[in-house]
Each structure stands twice: as structure tokens, then as C-alpha cells.
Image: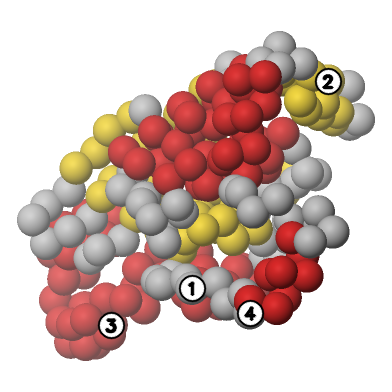
Amino acid sequence: MQFDAILLPPRRADSIAPGYWHDRTINEDLDACLAECPDKLALTAVRVEAGDVRRFTYREMATLADRIAVGLSRLGVGRNDVVAMQLPNWWHFSLLYLACSRIGAVLNPLMPIFRERELSFMLRHGEAKVFVVPKRFRNFDHEAMARAIIALLTDERARRTMGAAGLRRVRERFSVDRMARDTLRVYEQTIEWRDGRLAAGAVEVSGRGAKSGEQ
């Protein structure tokens, strides 16, 4: 999916003149802070329900953003690709946004209250290449829901690609998971953070066969 920001010259000038916009990207701002004050506190994340407080310096934040960016790249995410995210207001939200900015991907944040009906439309319409969810949030199993949505979208794509008769023939030979790996260009991944490190088990689906790995 291509994204072209439309910023009319007068509006751009009006934003730069009073200092609202410094004519640089968030990557440049992060790198500047990393060079000037690497050990200054940059982010404090509080999870009231868990009694957890995490603090990040600019150095720590930049390091984690770069690691996550590498993990996303190894999943096949690149410039203009959409990374859909259904995360609460956790530190993971900020770090994932910075990681997407590092590689030119587009982050599509989705509200945690959305369920199958809304998410199926949004993931389909936005052409998301990766879908990031919490394992559980507020006693709801987001991982199970995400897997069910992936299976649904896989079926829909199979019908468009092969037709109903072709889909039935494939189902006679393969399970849905096998069909997704061997037949379609779909990504199914489980992404979680382990001690501040992005761990991603992924299957890249293509006509040339599947490749799997963990970062």
C-alpha cells in the first residue's frame, strides 16, 4: 500500500514559522536526543492494574526500537507496509511506533475494545502485513481472537484466488494452517516481548513455500 502525505506549501510554512514543526522526523529527534542526552529519562510507563513501572532512557528506548525494527524487517515488513496494532497504552505502543518509523512502515493503531467484526474489516481494508496484540488484556484473550481472524481472512483470500471449488479441493488435502503456508501470501505471527526483546515466530507465505523463524 502506498502512502503519500499531502501537505500544501502554505500549511507547511504556517507550521514551521511559529516553531510547531521543526522540519525533521521523529527519527531525527530521537537520534538527536540519543547524541545529546542518552541517559536522560525519556519514557515512564505505569501499569496500575499490575503495579508495574518501567522507565527508559533515550539510549534504552533507541536500542529497543532498533531491535524491534530488525525483528519486523525479518518478518518481511518494509517501507509503506502496514503494521496493525491493538495494544493498550503500554510502553510497547511507543516502542513499536518508533520501530515502524525506523524502517518506514506505517503503524495502524486499533482500539483494544474492537472485536472480530471491526477488526476483520480494518485488517482487510488496511492490508496489514503484521498484527500485534497483547496475549491477554482485561481478561480477554486477544491472541485467540487474532488467530481466528487470521483464519477467516485466509479463507476469504483463498476463495478469491481459487474459487469455491478450488478451496474445497485444497481443504481435502491440507489443514487451514498448511493451506496458508503453502498457498497464499499471508503472514501469521505471534509477537511478544520477552525482557524487553521482541520475540516473533513467523510464517512467510508464498508460492515458493514457507519460511519460519524466531527473532
Residue 159's disc number = 3
Give the percent coordinates (x, y) of residue 117.
Answer: 62, 75
Identify residue for label 4.
Answer: 8
Q: 139 or 40: which is nearer to us?
A: 40
The answer to whether residue 82 of the structure is visible from this angle is: yes
The picture quadrant where one finds residue 89 is top right
Percent across and percent down for residue 68 are 48, 33
First along the sequence among labels 2 and 3: 2
Residue 53 is tagged as: 2
Side of 94 where 164 appears, left or right: left
Earlier along the polypeptide chain: callout 2 or callout 1?
1
> Callout 4: 10 Å neighbours few (<14), some, many (20+)?
few
From what the image shows, is residue 90 above or below residue 214?
A: below
Give the secondary structure at mark 2: strand
Secondary-structure class at tag 1: loop
* Discs 2/1, front: 1
Amino acid carrying label 4: it is Leu
Q: Earlier in the sequence, mark 3 or mark 4?
A: 4
Q: Earlier in the sequence, mark 3 or mark 1?
A: 1
Q: In the figure, is residue 22 to the left or right of 119? A: right
Q: CA distance from mark 2 to mark 3?
A: 47 Å
Mark 1, residue position: 4
Looking at the rendered image, the quarter that the N terminus falls into is bottom left
Mark 3: few, some, or many residues within 10 Å (few <14, many ≥20)? some
Element class at badge 4: loop
How far apart are the alpha carbons under marks 3 and 4?
Answer: 42 Å
79 relative to 27, above or below = below
| Cα–Cα span, label 2 and label 1 | 38 Å
What type is the residue that disc 1 sits on?
Asp
Q: Nearer the viewer, residue 6 or 80?
A: 6
Which corner quadrant holds the C terminus? top left
